[in-house]
Amino acid sequence: MLPLILLAGLSCVSTTAQILETVAQWPLLDFALPFDQEFLNQYRPENVVPTGIEVTWDKVFVSIPRLRAGVPSTLNYFPRNIPLESSPQLQAYPSWDWHSAGRGDLNCSKLISVYRTKLDRCNRLWVVDSGIMTSIDNFTPVCTPKIMVFDLKTDQLVRQYEFPRDALRPNTLLTNLIIDDTSATTCDDVFLYISDTAGPGLLVFDGATDRSWRVVHATMYPDPNFSMYRIGNDMFELLDGVVGLAFSARLGTVYYQPLATDRLFSIPTTALQAGPPAFGEQLPVTLVGKKSSQGLALAVDPRDDTILFAPFTETIIAAWQPQTNKQRIVAFSPEKLQFTAEIRWAEHDNGNIWIMSSRFQKFFRRQVNIRDINIRVMRLRPIFF
Ligand SMILES: *[C@@H]1O[C@H](CO)[C@@H](O)[C@H](O)[C@H]1NC(C)=O
Ligand SMILES: *[C@@H]1O[C@H](CO)[C@@H](O)[C@H](O)[C@H]1NC(C)=O
């Protein structure tokens, strides 16, 4: 019997000893643009929607894929030591030189379009570059998808990997990643599990051998019955496959969810690491549970293996421990939790949960109101009595 996560029809919210604090907020994102007229000419702020954050001791990285034309830089940061609720200008990372795509100059040795990044234990940022321009409007592949690793101490590129053709499909769109260092002995022999949202499937990268392969299962595809989303009064349709990923090191499990589904699935990391599956081989996928509505962001709190997720329609962050079936609403805000794109358990913030919401539905439908706060980076701060 499946554990049902029944969070629909929510009328009252249990109080928790945590508050949702807004670290940074913007009506539209703002950049510290370089003195280069071409960046300014191409910049279209109403087309700029972030999809991922990563939290270090002193910076918050913000990934902004080129969903539509007019994104100045696809990988950015702002400093952490800013007053709450401020609207910092984003700084291009590692420098503007890496973002010539923002001035119309496409060069495959630079950054093209990044959805998410992850920090490893060696203070290095792993960046998956989709290589796709204007993915929402006309999906133009311009460069081979690649992994780039930047050392945050020197801001230098220290490793690079281009995916081989046989791991890719014509509409491959790499959007999310997990770093699995449970069996690693160095900074480099990690495994990466990467979502291909439009392909759909998972790519596995073996850092010890520089090999990668694709695993596919029907549960990674969008469910057409769940391709319509409701957030507040907004409805929108998107037939997206696997994108939400989370990882429990202790259980050796990767959790995943397509955008268009009400379900959450899992797969053991042993099955992912075993190399390319033989033709016709079935992957050991488990249906973990059902959610009250669709969602994107997923995270695991490694202290107790609680899964954190964000059903769009309820505008909540929910926590669920699958072993005990304990469920909890950790945050609720129809105003601040419209389209939660990211939930991060922040090791560099004492394990506090960081959240990014983008009101993507309004940008997508070209109905963004520039008098509203549309994009927020938030943090769940414990209250001590
Ligand atoms: C692309 O960028 C690399 C690294 O900056 C540079 O060496 C190369 O000349 C550039 N290629 C073109 C065609 O501009
Ligand atoms: C979609 O909904 C229809 C009608 O409720 C149902 O018959 C069908 O099995 C559903 N399909 C999937 C993939 O769940």
Image: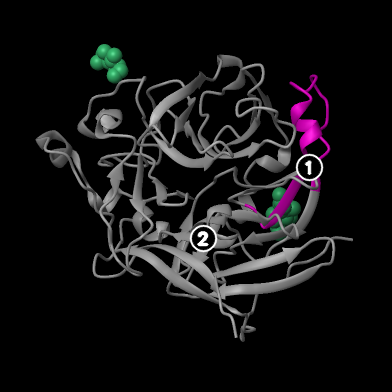
Based on the displayed image, in which of its 4 quarters is residue 92 positioned?
top left
Q: Quadrant of the C terminus?
A: bottom right
Q: Residues within 10 Å of mark 2 (few under 14, many from 20)?
A: many
Answer whether residue 296 is visible to the viewer in this image: no
**Residue segment shown in magenta:** 261-286
The residue tagged 1 is: 252
Answer whether residue 334 is visible to the viewer in this image: yes
Q: Earlier in the sequence, mark 2 or mark 1?
A: 1
The residue tagged 2 is: 354
Indicate whether residue 270 is drawn in magenta: yes
From the viewer's perspective, tell me whether residue 283 is left or right of residue 159: right
Instruction: Please determine whether, in this image, residue 27 is positioned above or below residue 153.
Output: below
Residue pictured at 41% horizontal, 52% vertical:
58
x and y, in percent, of residue 309 in the image: 62, 60
Indicate whether residue 219 is drawn in magenta: no
Q: Nearer the viewer, residue 183 or 90?
A: 183
Instruction: Please determine whether, in this image, residue 161 is positioned above or below residue 250.
Output: above
Q: Nearer the viewer, residue 206 or 369?
A: 206
Residue pictured at 56% horizontal, 55% vertical:
344
Instruction: Please determine whether, in this image, residue 219 is positioned above or below residue 138.
Output: below
Q: Are marks 2 and 1 in contact (CB under 8 Å)?
A: no
